[in-house]
Image (cartoon, rainbow, N blue to C red):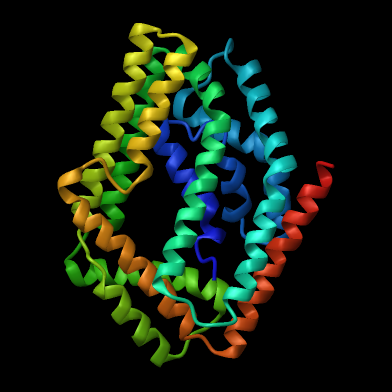
Amino acid sequence: MHYAVPNILSEMQNFIMRLFCAKTIKTALMLTVLLLAGCSAARFGYNHGESLTYWWLNRYIDVGADQQPWVKKDIEKLFAWHRKTQLQDYVQLLKLAQKQVQRNVSTAEILTDYDEAKQRAALIIDKALPDLADLALTLQPQQIARIEKKSAANNDDYRKDYLRGDIEQHQRFRFKKVMEQAEYWFGDFSREQEALIRRASDARPLDNALWLADRLHRQREMIAVLKKIQAEKPSRDATMLLLKDYAVLVFEPTGMTEHAQFFNASKEGMASMAALIINSTTPEQKARAIRKLQQWIDNFDTLAAQSA
């Protein structure tokens, strides 16, 4: 199954958030749809995505009065483009996922799904890049400081969630997150299934402190790029190039090349576990996932029709 497809929003959200403080312009776009996971709720969230995106951006940078009109306009243009050009692509991917979930899948297929999700995130980034550059060029020192402060608060939340307790507690917490996603798509799992998934979850590399270090590394790079743009005021094209270079830097799990083996193994472990979950489900569980996917197909069809 295209296991990564339903999480495109979150993937894009996290990427754009790293890309530049503000999951600006594009992030809530998909994030809203999948985060609100539900038929009418998803349509409602997407249809109000412009407002939600602006609200989210404002939390990070406190949009200035002179920035507000064109930032809102850019967000509206981005959503209009997305509705018109991208939603039917998601429909096709989800239809493939319906076929995929009916049979056993391999780790390699899951990794392919992951790459496809990244490609679609990259497409959105490319479309948003000129507007991101415009915003970056107008950021004031206090706005960049606000981004740093907000990032620090998010890091504190991460520490509370992921660094408390011992390894066993970390494993349980990670497994709980896995089961929340699995149960959304497939419903309840038997004790035997849960035990199987728990073993696969625990088999993945675990180093939450290293993930935090990676997170901090990305944030430092992001702030350095924004400060450089703010101080030097390069041309729009040069600014886009700086942001694009940063996007390339963070598109893979880390810029910390000395830990590449760990992050690659983590991705492989996640893909292997996703395949195991799909392959261990019963016909009834698979039927539920197919129905869930159909709900998303119907949602995207409806949203796309509204832009016609």
Left or right position of 248 against 302: left
Residue that appears at 46% across and 90% down: 190
> What number of labels is visible?
0
Residue 276: x percent and y percent?
41, 79
Left or right position of 146 against 123: left
Mark yes or no: residue 119 visible.
yes
Residue that appears at 30% across and 34% down: 219
Please identify the quarter of the rendering in which residue 208 is found. Answer: bottom left
Q: Is 99 located above or below residue 229 in the figure?
A: below
Residue 57: x percent and y percent?
52, 30
Left or right position of 155 against 25: left
* Quadrant including the C terminus: top right
Please identify the quarter of the rendering in which residue 67 is found. Answer: top right
Residue 13: x percent and y percent?
49, 44
Left or right position of 93 against 221: right
Q: Is 80 located above or below residue 211 in the figure?
A: above
Residue that appears at 51% across and 75% down: 183
Mark yes or no: residue 139 visible.
no
Q: Is 214 located above or below residue 74 in the figure?
A: below
The residue nearer to you, when weighing 157 against 187, is 187
Q: Is 236 located above or below residue 267 in the figure?
A: above
The residue nearer to you, when weighing 57 against 29, is 29
* Quadrant including the N terminus: bottom right
Residue 6: x percent and y percent?
56, 60
Please identify the quarter of the rendering in which residue 222 is found. Answer: top left
Residue that appears at 34% across and 39% down: 250
